[in-house]
Image (tube, coloured by chain):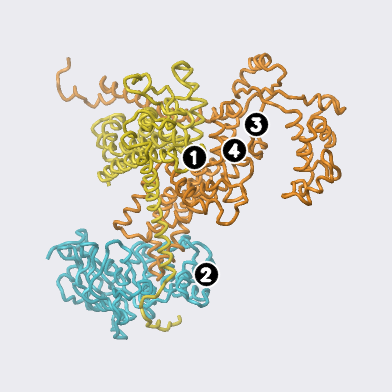
């Protein structure tokens, strides 16, 4: 195969198989929150994602891994049609959500995004108060309920409440990077989505902040389906139930090499490509 | 932690958002209004100019060939106005180009942040002073100055040189800021390459940076000419209050026709003087200023489009 | 002769003592640098000269010839020498008026406004009462309070003292050449008094326009400018910001958008006088029924057909529209895309994102650009001459359908007058205009700095 990807991947890097994987003991529910069928994503003439067929299990964590530039982020952003905002981006095929194809002309992307939320690579709080950051999404979506309670509940779920409860009126920018990212997660939770897409949510954070976010993601699984893009295999191995490995072909289009439970994929990968990647013999 | 009830599996069906559509529509109308402005300019100037050329008193051939503009006896040749405009604009460029370009080179290649911090506001203030104030300056300072240097017999009270020089001062900020942008766009690596072969700062500025920014600087020049041609108040106040009619062969070319020290009325100056009076619609005078306006519009638009081409060229090279 | 070799062309020791050729090159560099600096100083010198020219004309000595000298008038009422007119009682001032002007003129003044609340001086009370009952319209004296002390004093100065400025001198000659000025004045204007005058004064700002430069003011023009700029702003701000939002947030990159953008850029380069002609053709002429206010039935007012404040404001509105759009686009573009993405990812609509995140963050930039555009409108002259600003108007504008003049037009007309005194008041008016513009620009700079500090 063509070897593309980062040549600087460390040869000696291996997956620590001793990490406990209690989360991979099998899905409690065997239903799918979202399914991609023959999905292709393009930027103009360039095909960034090729023939993806995937099912994302309800209330489980699915990690998307693969070399950089392999279309992980594009795939993720296609799932809630955030890529609609990119000039020239389009998708073919289907993504089924509650039995509907999200690309159908009758589907409202705004409604879709409300139910499939997103957390971005870099924390991007609004330049507003912490309170307003969390409450804004609920407010514009016309949620008629006690906003104070919602803000508190969301911040608690994001494990941020104790740190910010006395300074809700301060700017979101006054928080540290890790706190900002948890604020962004609280903001996403506040509109009560079913699925949360996370695009390398810890890549801009220090190890301590990363650990807190990873723990938080585990807690959130109870209520939400989570699809997370990461290029840290440790993170994928430790924090996800299912893992999808993508690679890119000679046309630089990303495709799914292998998908399965995280335990299986990291210990007994079916494809040589996968093994090469996770053991670092890649590129 | 409370477990949340699963969200209702409601429909993703498109919601009707009439508000969104209305807002989108309104915003589009706001943007499209600018097209209407252009259409309005072209239509109104064109319509009145057409009425003018079609009238019995005037013709396009006379407009483009005659050297007499005397509405009172129905002579409508645009050349006296065009030549006066040319005189003021050329004078203006003679002032603005060297000063503006030198300022730009100094600011971009030599100046310390402190000098920049002083000069930039000066240029901004110069650019922000209303043109009528420059007109006052031309009449009460520049004209007496020219007359005291060259003699009152040489320089008339109203003269195109004084107006032209002051128009030049007024467009210095335009020349310098556009040129500076162009100089800035030249990559640092080119300068470093030049220094690395032992060039001095001057050699680097003139032989490497300046040629590299040439299309951008050309754009600045072209746009400045357009601005000088369209400038109105300075020439209306200081250049002259009547067309400088002439006859080839009889009037000396350098002594009178192109002599900047005698009075001459420019295209813009004439429009202002005629419309400042009580102008009745549907008169030949009314139509005639629209014909001049159309000519002015075509000239300045052509120059502006040309300038944008040059800008696009240097952007292409470095971006 | 040193033999040719590596040492000769520049060994390590030569680095410190440069060759003659290098010295020449560096000297040339220094000369060029000074030349560049000199050119740059031309710009600075131009600005300084301009300001000095204006200040020089705004203050200076004037030779005043009085029809009656104030000293003589004061003495005629039995006051000691050296008493100022303003120190006289109102009764004495009115007595001076009675002695100094014709009864007919006095009657006219009294019908305009009474001198005393409790008695009449020139006019018969019965006549005034009749006029108040039957007059159509009744004279202002029927409802106005009596003239104040200072109003009567001004009337005495204007009508009895009748000062005429017969000569003016610039600030520089007044200060550095005072002896020559005095000698010249004594010879040329015997009987005239020399006094130092600041042409810029509070009276100048609040007095209406007048054919007499000594008492002319810019009140009418200032109010006119204010009205026109208000209309300009009300028209161009919402449309300009709307257009910028459309182009930055809604428009797809297609042919139509490219045309819109090119068109806006081209409009920004159209000479302002062309906008004046557009305004004349569209607002003044074609839309006369609307811009004259006649559709409201305000025909009774002496409006000058479509040559009104609305027409002027809309014309300038079109003129600064491209500037506002381009500035607002830049401000909107500076808002980080991550905020839009965050907004959209929460299931907000485009407009909700724009309104809650893009606009609040772009607002300081938009306002800065708008202030600068307004400053431009405030200084525009040519388009308003073409649209038809009134050449002489002494009444305050009463609304959007009044005829008007603005400060730059006033400056233009005064500058074009042959008498020296008009140059002086033109300079004073320029000072007022420049102070206004400087205030606006300072506001814009403060706003910009505050904003860039916050985002940094």
Instruction: Tell me the mark number nearer the camera, choosing from 3 and 4.
Output: 4
Residue at position x 71%, y 27% in the image = C163
* Mark whose residue sits in front, 1 or 4: 1
Between marks 2 and 1 in the image, the one whose residue lies nearer the viewer: 1
Nearer the viewer's eye, disc 4 or disc 2? 4
Q: Secondary structure at mark 4?
A: loop
Residue that carries the numbered disc 2 in the rendered image:
A165
Q: Is residue C225 left or right of residue A105?
A: right
Tell which residue pokes out farthest to the right in this image.
Answer: C78
Residue toward you, C234 or C369: C234
Which hue belongs to chain B?
yellow
Image-quadrant location for residue B183: top left
Q: Are marks 2 and 1 in contact (CB under 8 Å)?
A: no
Label ID, residue C392: 4
Q: Is residue A22 visible?
A: no
Circle on res. B279: 1
Report which colour depicts chain C: orange
């Amino acid at each position: 195969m063509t070897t593309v990807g980062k040549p600087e991947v460390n040869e000696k890097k291996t997956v620590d198989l001793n990490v406990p994987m209690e989360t991979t003991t099998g899905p409690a529910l065997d239903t799918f929150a979202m399914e991609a069928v023959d999905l292709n994503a393009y930027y103009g003439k360039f095909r960034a994602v090729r023939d993806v067929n995937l099912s994302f299990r309800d209330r489980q964590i699915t990690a998307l891994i693969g070399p950089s530039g392999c279309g992980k982020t594009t795939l993720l952003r296609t799932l809630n049609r955030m890529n609609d905002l990119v000039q020239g981006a389009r998708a073919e095929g289907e993504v089924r959500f509650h039995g509907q194809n999200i690309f159908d002309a009758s589907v409202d992307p705004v409604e879709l995004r409300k139910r499939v939320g997103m957390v971005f690579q870099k924390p991007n709080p609004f330049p507003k108060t912490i309170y307003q950051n969390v409450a804004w999404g609920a407010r514009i979506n016309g949620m008629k309920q006690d906003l104070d309670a919602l803000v508190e509940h969301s911040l608690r779920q994001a494990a941020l409440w104790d740190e910010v409860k006395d300074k809700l009126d301060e700017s979101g920018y006054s928080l540290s990077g890790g706190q900002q990212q948890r604020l962004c997660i609280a903001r996403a939770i506040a509109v009560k989505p079913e699925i949360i897409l996370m695009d390398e949510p810890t890549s801009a954070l220090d190890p301590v902040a990363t650990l807190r976010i990873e723990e938080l993601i585990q807690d959130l699984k109870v209520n939400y389906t989570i699809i997370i893009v990461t290029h840290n295999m440790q993170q994928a191995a430790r924090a996800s139930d299912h893992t999808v490995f993508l690679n890119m072909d000679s046309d630089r289009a990303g495709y799914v090499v292998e998908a399965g439970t995280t335990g299986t994929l990291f210990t007994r990968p079916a494809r040589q490509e996968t093994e090469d990647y996770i053991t670092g013999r890649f590129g | 932690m409370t477990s949340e009830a699963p969200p209702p599996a409601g429909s993703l069906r498109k919601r009707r958002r009439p508000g969104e559509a209305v807002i989108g529509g309104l915003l589009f109308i706001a943007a499209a209004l600018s097209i209407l402005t252009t259409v309005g300019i072209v239509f109104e100037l064109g319509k009145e100019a057409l009425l003018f050329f079609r009238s019995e008193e005037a013709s396009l051939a006379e407009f483009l060939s005659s050297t007499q503009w005397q509405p009172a006896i129905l002579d409508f040749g645009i050349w006296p106005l065009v030549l006066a405009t040319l005189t003021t604009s050329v004078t203006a460029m003679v002032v603005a180009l060297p000063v503006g370009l030198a300022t730009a080179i100094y600011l971009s290649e030599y100046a310390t942040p402190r000098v920049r911090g002083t000069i930039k506001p000066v240029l901004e203030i110069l650019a922000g002073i209303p043109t009528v104030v420059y007109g006052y300056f031309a009449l009460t300072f520049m004209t007496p100055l020219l007359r005291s240097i060259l003699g009152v017999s040489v320089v008339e009270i109203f003269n195109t040189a004084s107006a032209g020089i002051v128009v030049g001062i007024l467009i210095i900020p335009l020349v310098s800021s556009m040129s500076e942008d162009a100089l800035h766009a030249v990559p640092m690596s080119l300068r470093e390459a030049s220094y690395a072969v032992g060039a001095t700062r001057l050699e680097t500025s003139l032989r490497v940076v300046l040629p590299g920014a040439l299309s951008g600087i050309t754009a600045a020049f072209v746009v400045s000419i357009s601005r000088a041609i369209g400038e109105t108040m300075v020439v209306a106040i200081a250049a002259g209050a009547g067309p400088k009619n002439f006859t080839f062969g009889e009037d000396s070319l350098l002594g009178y026709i192109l002599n900047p020290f005698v009075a001459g009325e420019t295209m813009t100056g004439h429009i202002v003087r005629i419309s400042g009076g009580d102008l009745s619609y549907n008169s030949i005078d009314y139509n005639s200023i629209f014909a001049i306006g159309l000519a002015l519009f075509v000239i300045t638009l052509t120059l502006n489009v040309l300038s944008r081409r040059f800008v696009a060229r240097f952007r292409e090279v470095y971006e | 002769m040193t033999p040719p070799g590596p040492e000769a062309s520049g060994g390590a020791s030569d680095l410190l003592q440069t060759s003659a050729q290098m010295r020449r090159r560096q000297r040339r560099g220094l000369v060029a640098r000074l030349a560049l600096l000199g050119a740059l100083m031309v710009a600075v010198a131009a600005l300084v000269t301009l300001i000095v020219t204006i200040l020089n004309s705004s203050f200076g000595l004037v030779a005043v010839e009085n029809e009656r000298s104030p000293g003589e008038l004061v003495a005629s009422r039995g006051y000691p020498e050296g008493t100022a007119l303003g120190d006289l009682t109102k009764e004495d001032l009115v007595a001076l008026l009675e002695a100094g002007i014709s009864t007919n003129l006095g009657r006219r003044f009294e019908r305009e406004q009474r001198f005393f609340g409790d008695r009449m001086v020139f006019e018969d009370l019965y006549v005034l009462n009749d006029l108040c009952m039957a007059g159509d319209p009744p004279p202002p004296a029927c409802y106005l309070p009596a003239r104040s002390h200072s109003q009567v004093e001004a009337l005495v100065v204007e009508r009895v003292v009748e000062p005429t400025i017969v000569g003016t001198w610039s600030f520089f000659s007044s200060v550095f050449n005072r002896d020559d000025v005095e000698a010249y004045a004594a010879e040329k204007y015997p009987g005239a008094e020399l006094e130092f005058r600041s042409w810029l004064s509070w009276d100048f700002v609040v007095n209406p326009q007048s054919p007499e430069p000594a008492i002319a003011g810019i009140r009418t023009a200032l109010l006119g400018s204010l009205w026109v700029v208000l209309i300009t702003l009300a028209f161009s701000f919402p449309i300009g910001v709307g257009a910028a939002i459309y182009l930055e947030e809604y428009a797809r990159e297609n042919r139509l958008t490219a045309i819109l953008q090119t068109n806006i850029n081209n409009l920004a380069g159209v000479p302002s006088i062309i906008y004046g002609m557009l305004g004349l053709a569209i607002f003044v002429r074609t839309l006369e029924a609307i811009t004259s206010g006649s559709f409201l039935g305000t025909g009774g007012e002496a409006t000058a057909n479509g040559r009104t404040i609305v027409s002027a404001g809309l014309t300038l509105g079109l003129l600064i529209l491209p500037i506002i759009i381009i500035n607002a686009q830049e401000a909107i573009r500076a808002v980080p895309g991550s905020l839009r993405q965050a907004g959209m990812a929460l299931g907000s609509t485009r407009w909700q994102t724009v309104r809650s995140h893009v606009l609040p963050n772009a607002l300081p930039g938009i306002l800065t650009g708008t202030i600068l555009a307004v400053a431009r409108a405030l200084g525009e002259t040519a388009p308003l001459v073409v649209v038809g600003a009134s050449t002489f108007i002494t009444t305050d504008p009463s609304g959007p359908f009044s005829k008007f003049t603005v400060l730059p037009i006033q400056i233009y007309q005064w500058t074009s007058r042959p008498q020296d005194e008009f140059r002086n008041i033109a300079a004073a008016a320029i000072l007022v205009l420049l102070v206004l513009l400087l205030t606006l620009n300072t506001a814009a700079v403060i706003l910009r700095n505050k904003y860039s500090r916050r985002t940094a």
